[in-house]
Amino acid sequence: MQLLVIEDEPGIARFLKQGLEEEAFTVTVATTGPEGLALAQQQAFSLLLVDWMLPGLTGLEVCQQLRAARVGTPLIFLTSKDTVADTVAGLQAGANDYIKKPFHFQELLERIRVQLRPAAEPAERFAVGPIVLNVATHQVHRDGEEIALTQKEFALLEYLLRHKGKVCRRQSIIEHVWDIHFEYSTSVIDVYMTALRKKLKLSKEDEYLQTIRGIGYVARD
């Protein structure tokens, strides 16, 4: 599988290229935002690893322009930014995941493998209130208007809707949506839920996706 690494720090770029090639990936490296954007648009990559701070265009701008051009290649941000606002901005731009610097290579490798696993697409539709999710077409609509979600946002919403009316515990969500079966912080779920609610235009008064404090989430009509 071919990966594109967009990273301007030579040491990190070499580290990623060597480590990923040892795992049998083919790796192309770009060192600026415009170079990476052009490569991602011109070639078919299995996944993009994008540094947030890049010369020419930021990683966020690269992601936004790719999604605007309907390039749906899975994208993972490499970033030293750690605020919730930055994380939400990245996810709303269309990133599939993010990993904070410094990171362990094995964690990055597992996140890459999760993104590259094929998603099942049974012909099923689920709904809660005005929100309709179609698994077969991978589309979500609210009141007839299509809502663009990232792959992980779609998977999270699908999991909640499949279990509508039942409380989905945080650990269960991280295991089924992120396919992580070891001890891992579930705070990433909160970040995705914030982004998901904003995209679905859910106000504080809407109760379609409820937080069960200290336990998890539930979808209810």
Image: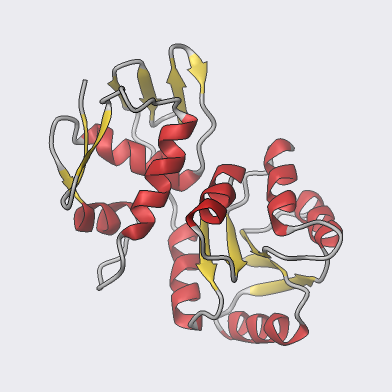
Looking at the image, residue 148 lies above or below residue 169: above
- Describe residue 182's horizontal placement relative to residue 32 as left or right: left
Looking at the image, residue 188 lies above or below residue 209: below
Task: Give the residue drawn at x 71%, y 85%.
Answer: 14
Q: Which colouring convention does the figure follow?
A: secondary structure
Q: Residue furthest left?
A: 166
Q: Nearer the viewer, residue 123 or 17?
A: 17
Rendered image quadrant of residue 143: top left
Rendered image quadrant of residue 217: top left
Q: Nearer the viewer, residue 137 or 79?
A: 79
Task: Give the residue drawn at x 62%, y 50%.
Answer: 73
Residue 125 in picture, x, y percent from top left: 32, 24
- Describe residue 36's horizontal placement relative to residue 133 as left or right: right
Looking at the image, residue 135 lies above or below residue 168: above
Q: Nearer the viewer, residue 199 or 46?
A: 199
Residue 178 in picture, x, y percent from top left: 35, 57
Task: Give the residue drawn at x 51%, y 42%.
Answer: 150
Please tell me how many numbered marks the rendered image carries.
0
Q: Nearer the viewer, residue 106 or 100?
A: 100
